[in-house]
Structures are given as structure tokens and as C-alpha cells.
Amino acid sequence: MSVLIIGSVALDSVETPEGKVNRAQGGSASYASIASSYWCEPAVVAVIGDDYPKSYLKRMTDRGINIDGVEVVPGGKSFHWSGFYKGTMHEAHTRETSLGVFQDFHPRIPEHLAESRLVLLGNIDPELQLEVLDQLKSPQLVVVDTMNLWINTKRSELLKVLSRADIIVVNDGEARMLAETIAIPECARYLLGLGPKFVIVKKGENGAQLHGHDNYFFSLPSFPVEILNDPTGAGDSFAGGMLGYLSRLPRHDGRHLNQALAVGTIMASFCVEAFSVERTAHLTAEEIKHRLGLLHTYTSFDAVEM
Amino acid sequence: MSVLIIGSVALDSVETPEGKVNRAQGGSASYASIASSYWCEPAVVAVIGDDYPKSYLKRMTDRGINIDGVEVVPGGKSFHWSGFYKGTMHEAHTRETSLGVFQDFHPRIPEHLAESRLVLLGNIDPELQLEVLDQLKSPQLVVVDTMNLWINTKRSELLKVLSRADIIVVNDGEARMLAETIAIPECARYLLGLGPKFVIVKKGENGAQLHGHDNYFFSLPSFPVEILNDPTGAGDSFAGGMLGYLSRLPRHDGRHLNQALAVGTIMASFCVEAFSVERTAHLTAEEIKHRLGLLHTYTSFDAVEM
């Protein structure tokens, strides 16, 4: 089934204890589409300036990503984020955000992409997420990501988006902010009450949880990486990998979502091993298969009899 | 196989956002032995003053726990810890620690207990842990717990203990302190280099990991509890449950340790639902079985094909 990914295609200048990059390929839609491209041929809707390196776009088209929906604003500046991570790299610190052409962005879904069945509404202004939803003809699975900024500044618009979502993907901090309570199961129940079928709570190096109605629950640790170079894009790679895998399945029930979480977990684990999309853009099927097998082994245990 | 648990039998005054208790039953050996008692008939070695409530000891003997090794010092004061937790309760804050009779404690293992095959060296001074090891005739499985205090003040003694351990149980912070590095896989390799067959890294609400030689690895999320009343004793209940389960098995390889981690995880989940040992001391086999089944369901997924 066809996959559409809306988000940012951006430039990132990132510094971590392991090194730094300047104006590297970044943005939620870049990370998510590249991660998903091992499972499907996604299309991206985003905006860039004509300063955006052609080589970065080629990296996407080389992976079969459709960029018909990436609007190029002549004379415009691409979205640029500059930030750093310290110590255990749990938290991103922003040095500067230059919205550039993103400032006046209104996503236009090309006619042939409006039929897309699976949609990832990456972490952008909920008003824009609503504009996207209004242009889609018959979405079957809408996955929504968001961030603390929108929870704080556009709560009512965000709640509208969430009411139209099938799956909400948030990190634990965002879940707590949205639900205004501490216990994650309670946060998940609050979010499920807003309308979606499933809520995914990402906990970074501590894994991810899937919450559904009727107390459906699945919990998965992260994949243990040896090299943590740059956590930027891990969440987007998670969502992209997940959606890519789901696009291959006829149904999206708990059992398949469990597997999709495993795929997302693996794609995130590759992402953090290098800066930008350097690792994620150059994987082999063998590498992905191997790590999926390891994750299964790492988390399986025989039922315990009393 | 016979199980021996060395640690503190203490009084805890604890305050959390959910309530408080005064001079309740506490101490690592209390928690661990009660959790293990659903799987074996453990013996405890510890020291108390004659101020220690008989009802607390009865709670232990009622659960089949052998307290022949619990020394009562006439006129002595029992170990008393007073502390509190705030917010998400991730961290214990100490108000006061009165060592009492623990100050001059030297564990004496009664003759008939010196033959014990499985031993939990609870979180006490590593010098005392060494004294215990010297009194054991033929231990088959030595599990060692410790804490930041001993890592800071008795590092060389602690390293001696760890070199004689089969399994080290630490939390992630302790693993990092011991190994003096951040990445947990690296910490685990350091600890495995000290001698034990397995290293268990507890991450509280984020689950636990099992690391072994030849890259053996298993990771388990925590059991999602609805009610978090008091995290005190969760780690001890985890270790106790684990050891109790292992005492029923002829071998202690990775596969069985995976299961033991599941048992430990479940016992810890009961522990935090009430203050002191109130919940852990009054479980039914049905409750334990049910939660073990849920944990298995919550963590299982079908292998993913590419």
C-alpha cells in the first residue's frame, strides 16, 4: 500500500561527544522516508529552498523515494537546525532554529499522492497536519508524531489531529505533557480516549510501548547499540521503519503492530550509530535481517511454570 | 536446592506521594526472602535488636522462611532507615540511617546453613560479604548485590567479592560507577571481566538486562503497574524472586536466567504496589501465575521476515 510522509527536509548542524557535522541532511521526513524505503517506496511532502544540496535529494531518489511533493522555493533558505548533545545524549539542546521556507509552508499534496493509504504526519505544526488530512482522499492508516512545542502552543489543534489519527507516536515526556499525569499507562488511556486505535510511547534507549484498547499492551526494549554517535532522527527512523513495514501488511492489528515496533526499533538503532542519515541510507537487507533476528532472540524467553 | 540470603532485616520509615509508613518491615533480606519464598524455603542471615517486632518475624516464618541465622542482640537497636521519594519516585532520598546493631555485625552462618548451594549476598559491606563467602562449604551459585556507597568506599574489597560471584546484580548507575564508563554494554563487559558468569543490570521502571560471556544478551521491560505506592525493596524482591526460581532448576544457563529475570520482574512489580512487604507477603500462586503469563504476552512478537 502507498506510503506518504509529511515533515521537514532540513539541514542539521549537530555536535555530540563523538563528533560534529555541519549542514548535514536532516529533518523528520528525510529520516522517516529513508528508514521506510527498505520496506516500501514512500513519497515525501515537504518544502526546501534552492540552497538544498542536490546530493541529499539524490540520496533519497536513489533509495526509491518519490520527491514529487517536495516543493522547492526559489531563493528560499532551507530549514536549518543547529544543536548539541552532552554526556549520555538523552536530550537535544538547540543552538539555533532557522525556519526559512518552512515559515510559510502549506503542504500541497500532488493529485496522484492524495490517494495514499498510509500517512505519516511528521512532527510539524498541527494546523499543517490538519491541512494534509483535508487533502487526503481515503487514508487507511494515519500515524501522527508531534512534539512539546505544539503541545504547549497549539493544544486544541493538536487534539483535533489526534482525533483523526489511527496511531499516535509520542515520547514519554510528551505523553505526560499531553495527559498531564505521570503514570504512563494512565497517559496512554487518556490518549486512547482521544480517538486513535493505538498509542506508541517511545522511551529512547529504554525502548517503546504499544498501548491499545481493551488493555492491549506490548513492550519492547531498545536494540543495544555499541556505538552511539548521534541520536538525531532516531524517533523519525522508528516511525518510518514502522510505517514501511505496516504498508506490506493487509491488516494493522496488535500482532502486526508488535512486529512493526520491532522494525522501528531496529531502524532507530542503525540511525544513532552515525551522524545524519549516513548509516540509515546505506544498509543492506542482510544487516536489517540480522539485527531483527537478534532483537527477537534478545527479548524471547520461555513461559515460566510455577 | 537450598537458598541462603544475607542482608539487612530492618525497620523503614518511608514517605512517598502516595502515603507513609513508620518503622515498617524492611531491609534487603526481608524483601528478598519473602519474594523468594514463593519458589523455595530460604534461610536468612542477618542481625536485629530485641526491639524488632515479633509480628514481622512471624510474617517471615509463616512464609516458610528459616530465621535460625537471624541474630538477636539483647538491648540492641535494629537497623532503621528513614527516607522519602518525590514525583516519579525514581530516587530515594535518605532522611536518616541508624545502623544500630548492624554497626558491629559479623555474619555467622549456622553450621547447617553453611551447606547452602544458592546464596544471595545482599547489599551489605563487601568485607562482610567476603566473611560470608569464607564460611560457605560449597556454594553453587553466588549472587551479589551492592550499592554506590560500597563502590565509593570499599572498591577493592568489592572487586574481590565480585571475582567470587556467579551473578552480579547492579542498577545502571552502579554499573556506570563500577566501570567508569557510560555505555551499558561496555559496563557489562567490564563487569564480566571481573569474573562472574552473568551481569544483571536493573533499570527500574525501564526493565532489566542480562549480559553474559560470548555476547549473550537478554533484555526485559518492567511489568507495567497501575499503582506505584513505594519503590523500596523492588530490587531486593527482584533478586529474591530470581534466586528462588533458580533454586528449582538443575542448571543456570542463559535460557533459565531469562526466565529468572521474568520472575524477578514480576516479584518487583508486586513489591512497589504497596508499602513495605504488605503486598509481596500476601500473594497467591494464581496472582503470580497470571502476571507471569501477562509479562510473556506483553513482550512476545512474531519473528519479522524481510
Image (cartoon, coloured by chain):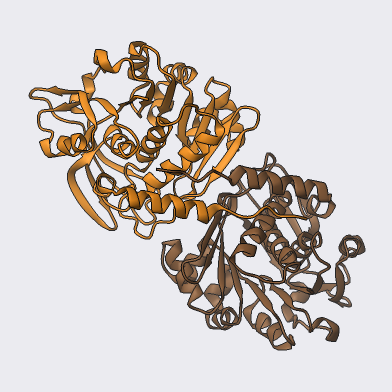
Chain colours: A orange, B brown
Q: Quadrant of residue A124?
A: top left
What quarter of the picture does the C terminus of chain B occupy?
Answer: top left
Q: Is residue A259 visible to the viewer in this orientation of the structure?
A: yes
- Indicate whether A265 appears above or below B93: above
Q: Seen in the image, is A31 located left or right of residue B44?
A: left
Q: Is residue B3 above or below residue A83?
A: below
Q: Nearer the viewer, residue A13 or B244?
A: B244
User: So how many labels did they put on this image?
Assistant: 0
* Percent coordinates x, y for residue B145 in the rendering: 63, 70
A90 in relation to B132, above or below: above
Q: Tell me if I can see residue A91 in this picture.
A: no
Q: Is residue A202 above or below residue B259?
A: above
Residue A132 at x, y = what percent? 33, 16
Image location (x, y in percent) of residue A45: 26, 24
- Quadrant occupied by the N terminus of chain B: bottom right
Residue at image point 50% right, 74% down: B192
Instruction: Identify the residue at image location x=42%, y=67%.
Output: B186
Quadrant in the rendering for residue B7: bottom right
Whole-percent x and y of residue A167? 48, 27
Asked where in the image residue A108 lies, by quadrant, the reply is: top left
Left/right of residue A194 with respect to residue A305 in the rendered view: left
